[in-house]
Image (spheres, rainbow, N blue to C red):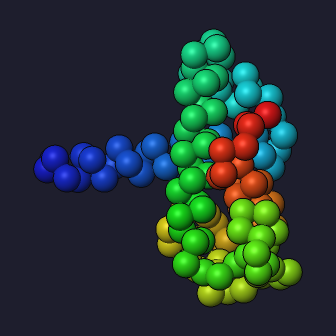
Amino acid sequence: MRKEDDLAEQSEAWMQSALTAAYRKRVLGWSWSRVTESVGMKPTKPNIRTVQRRVQQYAEFTFDAVAPLNIWEPGQLRRKLRDGVLDSKRVQLQLKSKTGLPFDTRPEECKKLIEALLRISGGSPLL
């Protein structure tokens, strides 16, 4: 296997793990201990913090993916999305291609997750 292929595979695995953790915490409302266990780690304080950082990084990655899409109410960057913007197929396709979110099969869960991630992408607490 080429080094580039290995890196791409690791990146894809990291992205899937971060997405899974974010979904379980932000959409399903699981505790950080349960989320950490579900991604194959013991729920120790350092491991929980690692998972929290991954979710934060995924949130920042999500913010970067939507930044050029003009999704915010004027003057409300990182505060308020334009009404109905996540119903736009153009926005959903962009988010799906950049973040791997399954908007085609689970649009409501994806919208809920995006809204939650965008709220924490500015460095807000992960609680």
Q: Residue at 73% across / 22% down in the picture?
A: 33
Image x and y of residue 35, in percent: 70, 31
Q: Residue at 55% across / 39% down in the picture?
A: 54
Image x and y of residue 95, in percent: 59, 71
Q: Residue at 63% across / 33% down in the picture?
A: 52
Q: Quadrant of residue 73?
A: bottom right
7 sits to left or right of 112: left
- Between residue 112 and residue 67, name the one nearer to us: 67
89 sits to left or right of 57: right
Residue 24 makes an appearance in the image: no
- Between residue 86 and residue 21, name the one nearer to us: 86
Image x and y of residue 2, in percent: 14, 50
Residue 10 makes an appearance in the image: yes
In the picture as drawn, the residue positioned furthest to the front comes out as 75
- Between residue 126 and residue 30, name the one nearer to us: 126
In the picture as drawn, the residue positioned furthest to the left comes out as 2
Q: Residue at 79% across / 34% down in the picture?
A: 127
Is 85 situated above or below 65?
A: below
